[in-house]
Amino acid sequence: MRRDEFMEEMLLRENIRKIIKIVKVRREQDENKKLMAEQMIRKVIRGILMEKAPVPDEIPNRSTGINVLEDLLKKVIPVLEVDFKSLTTSDEQRGSFRAHVLNGIQNIIAVANANANAVMVKEEININIEDDERFIDIEPESEKELDPKEEFATGLEATELDQTGRNVAFNSFKKIEQNILDAYELLSDDEDKKVFYNYLLTNVKLYFDKFEDELANEVPDVTTPEYEEAAVEADEADVGVGEEDIEAEL
């Protein structure tokens, strides 16, 4: 090959490489625009929901249930934030954490209500089942010895959720479970209990959305030297086979 032909060939390859990079940049820019649009929509929706939720400093005549809930959120939300943001491997882990925490809240409130009703019944009939020799326990031992994590996930058996997210949620929930029960048991008024429960779930969901948005801006792309080297090699390989792709893009 003559020198001038060789130089033309090198120049052509260099131009093709530049065009490929331009196409890739355009693709990345389009993806970033889509991501920004999605985040903007989520923020707008969350803003609308937050307007409907009670704002402590702006609502002087709120219910006792909301006052109790505000104190509770100051204790539990920081705990949930730390554990939620520790799950950075995948969205599935955080989705599982979120689902199990919300399910755990629903379960312990349901148990608290059931226990309260059971106490009322016991007081009415004046019988202590545990101490009564006539009581015959027919529950199989196998059902009594459930794995604590599986018991924690009661209600989500039909779903295939990430196990790491479940396990972290289990440990996290143990830190806040008693706080929730103590706060809920302060309330005896049915309306206060209803407001407390509904806004507890709503606020926890909103905070999870907030944490997810913050992670999207804080967590860098995970990379390794091996990945960077492979990426360079793949980029160079595109020079010889990328002509059809370039024509399709243009």
Image (cartoon, helix red, strand yellow):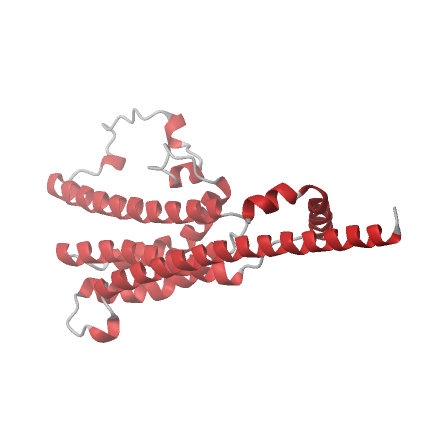
Q: Is residue 119 left or right of residue 204?
A: left
Q: Is residue 78 left or right of residue 198?
A: right
Q: Residue at x 51, y 52 (%)?
A: 87
Report the front residue among 84 and 48. Answer: 48
Q: Residue at x 52, y 55 (%)?
A: 86
Residue 101 locus on image (x, y percent): 38, 49
Is 205 above or below relative to 164?
A: below
Residue 241 locus on image (x, y percent): 69, 41
| Residue furthest to the left | 124
Q: Residue at x 64, y 51 (%)?
A: 20
Residue 111 locus on image (x, y percent): 27, 44
Q: Residue at x 40, y 26 (%)?
A: 142
Q: Quadrant of residue 207?
A: bottom left
Is 124 above or below relative to 188?
A: above
Report the front residue among 208 and 25. Answer: 25
Residue 218 visible in the snapshot: yes
Residue 164 locus on image (x, y percent): 51, 43
Q: Quadrant of residue 184?
A: bottom left
Residue 83 visible in the snapshot: no
Q: How many marks?
A: 0
| Residue furthest to the right | 2
Q: Is residue 139 left or right of residue 84?
A: left
Report the front residue among 3 and 148. Answer: 3
